[in-house]
Amino acid sequence: MTTPIQLMAISPESFPAWRERSSLEYENDLVAMGETAAIAQQRAQASLAGAFPEGHPTPDNAVFFVVDDAGSTVGYLWVGRDTSDDSSAWWVWDIVIDAEQRGRGLGRATMQAAERYARSHGARTLGLNVFGFNHTARSLYETLGYDTTAIKMRKQL
């Protein structure tokens, strides 16, 4: 049974705060992977500036709040076309379920909603990246049928 959620398109007024939160989440992940705080901040800010050159989401690069069946915002989803020339290839750029809300099936329901959204916009594939340290997310994606297409490895010297 899927936990009911709704994807609510982010409002223009909420977008700057979401962008800051997403940037901080990405920075923290990059630092966890060994980047310096300064480099992580530069990379995260550049990534978001490049993704939203006009300063707002579009139907092909959409940001949603994830809302549970009680009407509470429990996370967010950013989904859009990938950066290849294949217009039918889409990507989950970011998905976050708030820490205190995890374990309720919300991540699974959000990914299924992302698949429906992408499919409704012409997607034939949906990809994503998961950091190596995020075993819980990787397990979820595997149970949803996502295949590993590359593994990046590194050793600290």
Image (cartoon, rainbow, N blue to C red):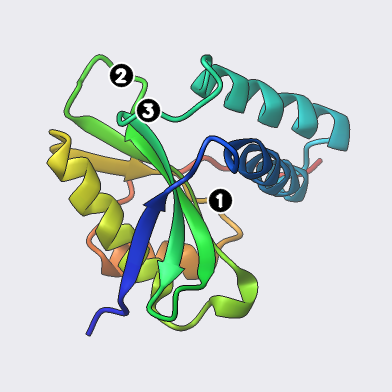
> Nearer the observer, disc 2 or disc 1?
2
> Nearer the observer, disc 3 or disc 1?
3
Q: Quadrant of residue 120?
A: top left
Q: Is residue 130 left or right of residue 28?
A: left
Quadrant into which the N terminus falls: bottom left
Residue 5 in picture, x, y percent from top left? 34, 70
Residue depicted at x 37% and y 28% = 58
Point out the tag, 3 or 1, that comes first from the N-terminus: 3
Residue 67 in picture, x, y percent from top left? 44, 66
Label 2, on which residue?
A: 84
Label 3, on which residue?
A: 58
Mark 2 lies on a secondary structure that is loop
Q: Is residue 82 above or below residue 50?
A: below
Label 3: few (<14), some (14–19) or many (≥20) C-alpha neighbours in 10 Å: few
Label 3 and label 1: CA atoms lie apart by: 26 Å
Point out the tag, 2 or 3, that comes first from the N-terminus: 3
Label 1, on which residue?
A: 131
Residue depicted at x 86% and y 30% = 38
